[in-house]
Amino acid sequence: MKKLIYIFSIIISLVLTSCTKVIDINLNKNDPKLVIEASVNADSLTHYVTLTNSINFDEDITPPRVTNATITITEADGSNLGTYSYDTNLGKYVLTNYLVKEGVTYELTVIANGKSFKATSTVPSRVKLDSLKVVKYPFGPNMTYAVVPLRHDPAGIANYYQFILKKEDKRVSGIYVEDDLGLDGQLTLKPIFADRNAFGPDTIVGSVDKWKKKVGDIVEIKDSILVEVEMQCIENKVYRYLFTLNLNQGKQQSATPSNPDPLFTNGALGYFSAQTTQRRTIWVTNK
């Protein structure tokens, strides 16, 4: 019996060896892509575009900025032309005094690296951000905190959101997007789950019951932290792009990561989002 098992093991090994194929994965070596991050907001007259070139998979550097591009925007019918200019202090292209309206489709054109890249986006209808609330959850010996953006979801309309989170004027890292699946026409009570310490204390030890924040060599103890939530109403295709990008960054494990659907022509990476934007603030406190 042992002899038969030994022979069978050898046969399996030979089969697996003969089926092995070397796969050459292109990790972007010598093939940089233009990366475009662009949005226009119905709640602002100033809009921004960031352009970079992609870097190799194994490079640990800041992606290089593209500073000599020509960027324009128009409404779908070619009217309302706007031209961006590069701001060296911001490291972004800026468009000022440009009015964006709900329900209107916009086309962004970027000419860079000798190529032209285009994308369109339509401003969705606004969903009002009513208020914020904080919920607490036990996490080991401490508490973790999450913010709930309260809003009444319009019935019969598919809605998609991106949330930008800030703690004391500093952006909380991560991509936070939601749809209204299962929440159509309802008051939304779904928390935004960031890192467990995103809205809580920087350090909690044992029974310490106040926030601790180190400022230089001094530890300040305070009772509350100011949190800001920016809610953007975005298109379905922008939501899908950001959701897939979030999967690829390992933030969620519910699906197999894949490449985001391209939103720009001519092989550019990134997104263009025409959107509405609202902001609310709340004090997170341990009391």
Image (cartoon, rainbow, N blue to C red):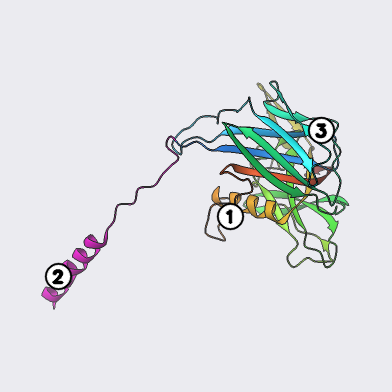
- In the rendering, which numbered label is found on residue 252? 1
Residue 126 percent across, percent down from the top left: 85, 52
Residue 168 percent across, percent down from the top left: 76, 34
- Does the image show residue 98? yes
Q: Measuring 87% from the left and 52% from the top, which residue is drawn there?
A: 128
Q: Amino acid at mark 1?
A: Gln
Type of secondary structure dominating the magenta stretch = helix
The span shown in magenta is 1-30
Q: Measuring 83% from the left and 61% from the top, which residue is drawn there?
A: 153
Residue 15 percent across, percent down from the top left: 22, 66
Q: Earlier in the sequence, mark 2 or mark 1?
A: 2
Residues packed near mark 2 inside 10 Å, few (<14), some (14 to 19) or many (20 plus): few
Residue 112 percent across, percent down from the top left: 61, 32
Of the 4 image quadrants, the one containing the C terminus is top right
Q: Measuring 74% from the left and 47% from the top, which residue is drawn there?
A: 163
Residues packed near mark 3 inside 10 Å, few (<14), some (14 to 19) or many (20 plus): some
Which one is closest to the eye, mark 3 or mark 2?
A: 3
What is the quadrant of residue 188 in the picture? bottom right
* Viewer-side residue, 110 vs 79: 79
Alpha-carbon distance for marks 3 and 2? 73 Å
